[in-house]
Image (tube, coloured by chain):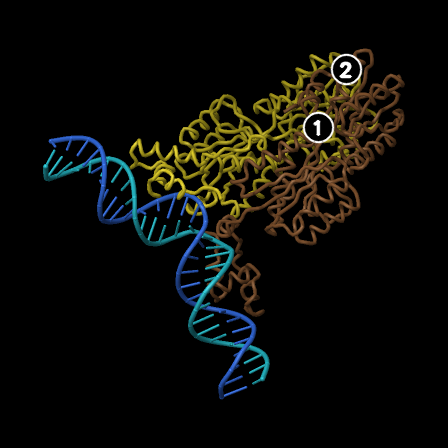
Chain colours: A yellow, B brown, C cyan, D blue
Amino acid sequence: MRPTVHDIAAAAGVSLATVDRVLNQRPGVRLVTREKVEEAIRQIGYIRDVAAANLAKGRVYPLVFIVPTGDNSFMHGLRSEVHHATLRASIERTDIRIVEVPAFDVPALVAALDALQGQDIAGVALVATDAPEVRAAVDRLVSERIPVVTLVSDLTDSTRHHYAGIDNIAAGRTAARLLGRFLGGREGDLTVLAGSMLVRDHRERLQGFSAVMAAEFPKLRLLPVLEGRDDPERTKSLVSKALSENKDIIGIYSLGAGNRGLIAALKAVRPERELTVVVHELTQHTRVALVDGTIDAVLNQDAGHEVRSAVRVMKATADGQAVIADQERIRLDIFLKDNLP
Amino acid sequence: MRPTVHDIAAAAGVSLATVDRVLNQRPGVRLVTREKVEEAIRQIGYIRDVAAANLAKGRVYPLVFIVPTGDNSFMHGLRSEVHHATLRASIERTDIRIVEVPAFDVPALVAALDALQGQDIAGVALVATDAPEVRAAVDRLVSERIPVVTLVSDLTDSTRHHYAGIDNIAAGRTAARLLGRFLGGREGDLTVLAGSMLVRDHRERLQGFSAVMAAEFPKLRLLPVLEGRDDPERTKSLVSKALSENKDIIGIYSLGAGNRGLIAALKAVRPERELTVVVHELTQHTRVALVDGTIDAVLNQDAGHEVRSAVRVMKATADGQAVIADQERIRLDIFLKDNLP
DNA sequence: CGATTTCTGATGTACGTAAATCAGAAATTT
DNA sequence: AAATTTCTGATTTACGTACATCAGAAATCG
């Protein structure tokens, strides 16, 4: 049987109350006694039964998810996953609040973060826009001992406790190698389509992509990045224009959202133009396009995993508990038409 | 506040004891009363607090993992992950026993399964060798109401509750497309290296691989499968022989374990022979080979995820609880040299 | 050394559920 | 209608921890 507080008390020769004071860092214990108890805890290898503790405390975890508005499928999916998490609220003892903030809007995000100060909150998860003001606001929350997790897009040099998202540099590099190898030594131009260079995940993907392209696929030339702002309409017109003006384009890497527009533009020039296309985010639209051959590979991050991971990490951090690091690593999914879930 | 058994009792106008009898399906409740209670449960939306229930029951889950012996890295890693799970035993209320059985040995596996009958066990996870005798033994356990989960390799037509592993047909198809596209229209022979056609995962990978190759890459010819029995030494000699006898081999798909031997054979013919190679299972050896360019892609299943998922599913099944299906889907990881974890 | 302050022990209640006991009510049988 | 049998209610203890209260012991101070 696993040891309990009673066993500690017996082993240390003190009362239950004293053990409790030591365990919960309450005052009223002499240093020598405290050390005696801590020694006993180590000796018998006591591990707190979190379930029982939470039951006794009547613990609930008020969590806040700050997610961008925007009508692209990925953010829609993310919001839907957070919503799913709220459905598990009672069984997971969470109380999740969703705060929506306009995409790429730094002041609005800062305001949302600052509004949380002083509130009784067990954790905050946010899709970060990578700006110093946001970092400062996050750091303020952290200094108030509120667990903060960045979701999908990380925040440079901030003190956030955890990042629940993929390694975007690796994602960009992977996209480059896939495109490069799929193009099999051909020569031509490549178009890169991004949402906005204001978010770190997009910058990092581009960085990884450019690095591998430059180093290993010299025959492929990168054209200036098109910024579609993750908006399908805008994306569509940008791509259509680029394709009609440049007949040397043989590949496209879309590292942001808004792929509905990209796909529409591609369909318009098929089958005359043969293009190798790698995009991010598996959505209804990209899935169909992958199956019908309009695009060749989809890189994906599983929003459901990210949300569940964020919840686990915030809870554990709030309790000062360790997490299974390997379990919380968000993996880059690579989908070809053959391994769709 | 979320409703408790007390609320049910009040709502149904019965006592706590009666509610308890209904909830735990104990005798001693008249049909009309039982229905009244069940109606009240629905009405107020009661959800059992599993943590509190487990605490009260002093529940522990005695679990058994049956894993093959064998000195290839993958099985080694799998055993190590199960071992890791035992380290979390006390906090997860599990009591995990590991049973080792010689690989591909049907009678031994059946004996190990039958030995569990009648024992007080909350769940069994096994790496299945796909034989009717094994299926029958599994079905016997299932009929004793013991949760059974297949791990890594599934069992055809059995009544096992869950399969914690990847979709191997999809894996084979994916390997085919990667190899096919990486070879970019070239013509030549392909060697497929398997462990044993006795295990379903290997058969399925081959099936998926062959299907896509035949349908979409007619210029690539499949040679007869080499069976390396997941043994590095045997694998090495098989591959060396094949490469020296056939100069038209331009690609290799290794769908089993024992890749140490494959890599050794490849190093011996490099850099004269240029081969595109896709293998399964990310290990110390395949990782290095991927980085140094000896192999081009690694398909992987995360043994840690599989083991943790198996534990979650067995516990949930034992409790008659639902699982988050999406969370328990084991994904096929595709690693290029750029997205190694 | 007595008076105060600080520490420690003993004890009880609570969290939500499981499980047991016993008495009394209702239904069924004789 | 009496005697059973079958249900139901009331109550209690337990799981492992948190937290509060109060009394008594030990340490510190004047």
Image quarter in which the C terminus of chain A is found: top right
Camera-nearest residue between B221 and A70? B221
- Mark 1 neighbour class, 10 Å CA radius: few under 14, some 14 to 19, many 20 or more: few
Position of residue B179 measured from the top left corner of the image (x, y, whole percent): 80, 24
Position of residue B241 measured from the top left corner of the image (x, y, whole percent): 86, 19
Residue at the spot 75% in from the left edge and 43% down from the top edge? B155
Residue at the spot 80% in from the left edge and 16% down from the top edge? A186
The residue tagged 2 is B267
**Label number found at residue B167:** none
Under mark 2, the amino acid is: Lys
Find residue A290 and report its image quarter: top right
Position of residue B293 measured from the top left corner of the image (x, y, whole percent): 73, 16
Mark 1 chain = B
> Between marks 2 and 1, how big is the CA–CA gap?
21 Å
Q: Is residue A267 visible?
A: no
User: Which-is-in-front pick, marks 2 and 1?
Assistant: 1
Position of B32 with respect to B207 (left or right) is left
Position of B299 with respect to A48 (left or right) is right
Camera-nearest residue between D30 and A18? A18
Q: Is residue A40 visible?
A: yes
Tags 2 and 1 both on a single chain: yes
Question: Total number of numbered labels?
Answer: 2
The residue tagged 1 is B71
Camera-nearest residue between A128 and A46? A46
Among the two numbered marks 2 and 1 on one chain, the one whose residue lies closer to the N terminus: 1
